[in-house]
Amino acid sequence: MKPGIHLTKIWFDDDMVELRIDVSDGFSLFSNQVYVGYPDLSRAVADLDVFKHQIHGGLVDLRFGEFGPEYANGAFHARFHFAKPGGRLFITCRQQSDFSEFSIMKVASEATLYLRTEPALLDRFIDELKGLDAKTSDEAYLQGN
């Protein structure tokens, strides 16, 4: 299993897209689904476009969906951080599935995975996210290492 973040469009309409997000650290894999409004997807692309130039200690958070039982579908939060020195990119991904009935309560599965990658791979991911945002592509992949 290769480390990385893989976003796949599984449904869309005029207002939002539903993504399946698969995150692997090379050993573990967690997959969930989130609803993302197009303005949120555009903001993520814009934030990453600025962040990619901050290789000497930049930090940016991406959040799709919301955590908690009161929200539909799942949630995804990724914190991107360029470490000093060297410019390696570190990503902490937290995910939560949709809530479902379990005995007498509602529960959701959750995972936190940690990834490393390189700035050049981030550039390709941003380009693929732009395709998702423009509705010209169905997936985006950030390769880890």
Image (tube, rainbow, N blue to C red):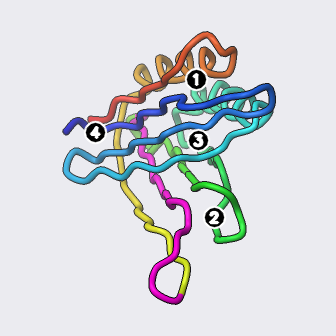
The dot on residue 67 is 2
- Amino acid type indicated by mark 2: Phe
According to the image, label 3 marks what residue?
58
Q: Which of marks 2 and 3 is in front?
A: 2
Q: Which residue lies furthest to the bottom in this view?
A: 104
Residue at image x 41%, y 61%?
A: 112
Q: Are marks 3 and 1 in contact (CB under 8 Å)?
A: no
Q: How far apart are marks 3 and 4 (CA)?
A: 22 Å
Going by the image, does 114 lie left or right of 33?
left
Q: Which is more N-terminal, label 2 or label 4?
A: 4
User: Image height check: is 104 above or below 143?
Assistant: below
Q: Residue 84, position in %: x, y? A: 45, 44
| Disc 4 + disc 2, Cβ < 8 Å | no
The amino acid beneath tag 4 is: Pro
Element under disc 1? helix
Residue tagged 1: 129
Q: Which amino acid type is shown beneath numbered disc 1? A: Leu
Q: Mark 4 points at which residue?
A: 3
